Image (tube, coloured by chain):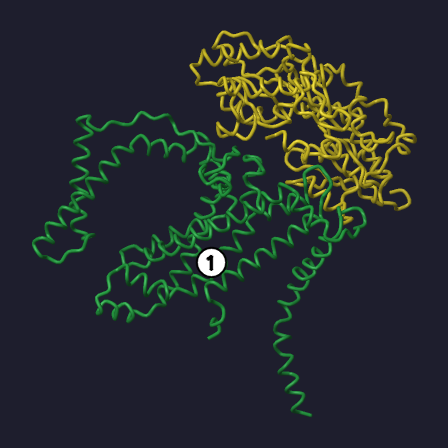
């Protein structure tokens, strides 16, 4: 009897401990999810009694152009942003993992975009993306000084190559990116460019001010991509979103990098591995778990992107920025017409299934998940 | 309190300046009138997305007893049976009569012969211009006899005088502004329940409106870092904007030194008529309220001649009572009073339509905005 009692206690203990979480989960997630699932098969509009309409909502969704646009926008957004933010986060983490004086300052500074309110950042970006905004201004400067920059970079590469090749001919071991040579190259390239410019040999290109409509446009970019092109305002949101999410993922990678045993690198060095070989054969495989986490979180976050579309609001045409999450909101509260809660719920269910499917596919391809508990 | 009956009427409306206005109205007109009847009122401002909030709370049964209803979306909640018809209350009322209210405003809230809302005030569009820019350029101010072409000429001269440092008109790329010109050209938004955008009148207005931008005589507020015409005017980089009386308080606070004038929108050269929108907001009573009688009493007090007079004289809005049309306020020589008069006149000059699109609401506008 005593035994059974204690084993019962043992069995129930986890559930008792889980109950605070389960309570919130059941009320705020399960209940809401089941209700949405039910509404997705009805024509509910918040006021009249919901009527069962079967899968009509789902069929109608795919007939609606705004929904298919949202679906396409969401997928494009998720794929591009997740890819780029993962790459940038990794590169930034590697850079932040160097032992340089004051690195802590940079780690903090680079993390700022992630701790700043996304609303505030979106508002700031909306200013920068204006037609006479900072971004168009910088692009204009870049075009004006394009020739100068080109000359400088060519000289830089030329001088560096010259120095390295001379040394190699003399039979000395030297790397292509030898830092002391780079310093010399930069100084010389700068002086030569400056002189050329001073004598008027390189001139500022006469270009019209760059006048790109970042937000208020239906134009699709890149123009050669045909059906794969996405609206430029969505591109603007991508830039903004990547900029704000990279630092968070950088922190994850940084933690991962610091967990890689130094002996692996030392052993590789003994075997004569170069910098990029160490990166490719040690760093990346060692960070596999982190990459899985980053990509999964990235996909979930990007597929559900909502706030930035909402804040940009009427600054850009709805069709050029709408994502699935925003479509759900827009159908549930469509300005001045009847709320289409049924359609909104159906779209929400599709978004949930889509997220689940994509994450499962990613899990399968990355071969992750199976050994996570080891 | 009589018989210990005490009812508190919850009033729901916008946040911002509306909060202080309505609270003052309550203190000045509702409390003195209704305190001995045991009725009090409390204002609950909704700072953002008022309409979404109202729909949600109506659906959840937590909405206030008395609420703002914008003509733009009122039809939907009325059709959903959420708003109490007022005819029985009006029949019994001693202070509020259907005939007191400007008919076109009341019509906007009348469906199938029943009145669902008492308009509290209204607005229309006026051409608000920067006097200094016209003065410096030695150009005559725009006036109510201008046609589209006249206005375009005047704007072109201002732009020329400033070497392009200043543009002509702040052009909001939305139907809420452009539509007034389509109406001026004689376009009807619904013919036999359908919308024809290929109508020559619509095209004419569209080409003129977008043509201003192509000719360098107009600029979208967003392109000069502003959200709307009022903001654009304060930069002194545009000569004129199309806005309603809501711009006045904004200019008072944000550009106190700006010398501005207002006039009616220009006439279409073909029809010889200006066009305009009527924007109006009414008080509606929650059909599921337990306090409907008290709510109606509060509504009476809020729309009483005294309350409306107060609103008008403070330059807050243009009240909906007919009797106030002859108010001396409109003859005052201040720019604000003059602009208010223009907005008041705008509602009855030319081809004017309420700012509503059947039950389609904003959805109807979306394709047109683009």
Which residue is disc 1 drawn over?
A295
Where residue B188 appears, as percent x and y from the top left, is: 72, 22
Residue nearest the observer in this picture, B236 or B293: B236
Query: From what the image shows, is residue B210 above or below residue A223?
Result: above
Left or right: B181 as drawn, with respect to A338: left
The residue closer to the viewer here, A239 or A343, is: A343
- The residue marked by circle 1 belongs to what chain? A
Question: In the rendering, what colour is chain B?
Answer: yellow
Q: Residue furthest bottom?
A: A1
Q: Is residue A77 above or below residue A258?
A: above
Whether residue B286 is visible here, answered yes or no, is no
Q: Position of residue A96 (x, y in %)?
A: 33, 56
- The answer to which image quadrant residue B337 occupies is top right
Image quarter in which the C terminus of chain B is found:
top right
**Percent position (x, y) of residue B208?**
58, 17
Q: Quadrant of the N terminus of chain B?
A: top right
Query: Residue shown at 25%/69% (left/top)?
Result: A266
Q: Is residue A34 left or right of residue A222?
A: right
Residue at the image position 62 percent from the left and 41 percent from the top = A66
Left or right placement of residue B147 versus residue A165 in this view? right
Circle 1 crowding by C-alpha within 10 Å: few under 14, some 14–19, many from 20: many
* Number of numbered callouts drawn: 1
Q: Is residue A140 visible?
A: yes
SS category of the residue bearing label 1:
helix
Between B255 and A31, the one nearer to me in the picture = A31
Q: Which chain, by letter, is green?
A: A
Q: Position of residue A227 (x, y in %)?
A: 51, 41
């Amino acid at each position: 009897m005593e035994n059974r009692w204690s084993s019962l206690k043992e069995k129930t203990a986890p559930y008792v401990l889980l109950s605070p979480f389960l309570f919130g989960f059941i009320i705020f997630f399960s209940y809401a999810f089941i209700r949405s699932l039910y509404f997705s098969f009805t024509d509910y509009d918040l006021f009249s009694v919901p009527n069962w309409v079967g899968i009509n909502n789902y069929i109608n969704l795919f007939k609606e152009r705004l929904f298919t646009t949202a679906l396409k926008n969401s997928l494009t957004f998720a794929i591009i942003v997740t890819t780029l933010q993962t790459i940038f986060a990794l590169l930034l983490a590697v850079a932040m993992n160097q032992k340089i004086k004051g690195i802590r300052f940079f780690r903090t500074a680079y993390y700022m975009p992630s701790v700043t309110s996304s609303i505030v950042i979106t508002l700031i970006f909306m200013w920068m993306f204006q037609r006479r905004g900072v971004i168009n201004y910088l692009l204009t400067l870049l075009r004006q000084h394009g020739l100068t920059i080109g000359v400088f970079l060519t000289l830089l590469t030329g001088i560096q190559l010259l120095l390295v090749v001379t040394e190699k001919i003399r039979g000395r071991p030297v790397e292509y990116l030898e830092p002391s040579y780079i310093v010399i190259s930069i100084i010389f390239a700068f002086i030569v460019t400056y002189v050329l410019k001073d004598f008027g040999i390189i001139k500022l290109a006469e270009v019209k001010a760059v006048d790109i409509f970042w937000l208020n446009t239906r134009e699709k970019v890149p123009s050669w991509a045909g059906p794969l092109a996405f609206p430029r305002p969505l591109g603007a949101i991508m830039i903004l979103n990547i900029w704000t999410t990279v630092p968070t993922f950088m922190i994850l990678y940084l933690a991962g990098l610091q967990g890689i045993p130094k002996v692996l690198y030392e052993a590789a060095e003994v075997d004569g591995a170069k910098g990029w070989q160490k990166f490719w054969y040690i760093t990346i495989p060692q960070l596999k778990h982190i990459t899985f986490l980053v990509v999964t979180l990235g996909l979930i976050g990007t597929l559900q992107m909502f706030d930035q579309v909402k804040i940009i609001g009427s600054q850009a045409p709805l069709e050029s920025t709408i994502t699935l999450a925003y479509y759900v909101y827009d159908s549930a509260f469509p300005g001045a017409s009847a709320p289409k809660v049924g359609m909104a719920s159906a779209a929400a269910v599709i978004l949930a299934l889509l997220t689940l499917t994509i994450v499962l596919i990613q899990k399968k391809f990355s071969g992750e998940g199976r050994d996570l508990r080891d | 309190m009589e018989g210990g009956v005490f009812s508190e009427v919850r009033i729901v409306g916008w946040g911002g300046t509306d909060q202080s206005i309505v609270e003052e109205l309550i203190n000045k007109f509702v409390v003195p009138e209704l305190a001995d009847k045991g009725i009090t009122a409390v204002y609950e401002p909704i700072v953002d997305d008022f309409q979404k909030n109202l729909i949600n709370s109506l659906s959840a049964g937590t909405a206030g007893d008395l609420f703002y209803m914008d003509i733009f979306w009122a039809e939907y909640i009325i059709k959903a049976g959420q708003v109490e018809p007022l005819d029985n209350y009006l029949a019994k009322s001693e202070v509020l009569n259907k005939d007191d209210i400007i008919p076109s405003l009341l019509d906007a809230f009348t469906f199938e012969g029943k009145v669902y809302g008492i308009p509290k005030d209204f607005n229309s569009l006026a051409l608000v211009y920067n006097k200094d820019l016209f003065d410096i350029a030695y150009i005559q101010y725009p006036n109510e006899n201008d046609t589209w072409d006249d206005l375009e000429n005047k704007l072109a001269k201002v732009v020329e005088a400033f070497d392009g440092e200043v543009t002509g008109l702040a052009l909001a790329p939305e139907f809420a502004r452009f539509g007034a010109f389509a109406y001026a050209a004689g376009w009807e938004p619904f013919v036999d329940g359908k919308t024809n955008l290929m109508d020559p009148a619509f095209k004419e207005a569209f080409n003129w409106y977008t043509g201003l931008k192509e000719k360098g005589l107009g600029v979208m507020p967003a392109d000069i870092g502003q959200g709307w015409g009022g903001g654009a005017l304060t930069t002194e980089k545009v000569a004129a904007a199309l806005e309603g009386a809501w711009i006045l308080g904004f200019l008072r606070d944000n550009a106190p030194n700006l010398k501005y004038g207002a006039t009616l929108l220009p006439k279409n050269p073909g029809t010889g008529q200006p066009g305009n929108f009527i924007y109006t907001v009414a008080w509606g009573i929650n059909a599921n309220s337990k306090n409907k009688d008290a709510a109606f009493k509060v509504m009476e007090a809020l729309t009483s001649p005294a309350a409306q007079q107060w609103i008008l004289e403070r330059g807050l809005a243009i009240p909906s009572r007919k009797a106030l049309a002859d108010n001396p306020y409109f003859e005052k020589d201040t720019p604000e009073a003059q602009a208010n008069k223009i907005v008041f006149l705008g509602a009855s000059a030319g081809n004017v339509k309420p700012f509503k699109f059947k039950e389609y609401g904003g959805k109807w506008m979306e394709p047109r905005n683009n």
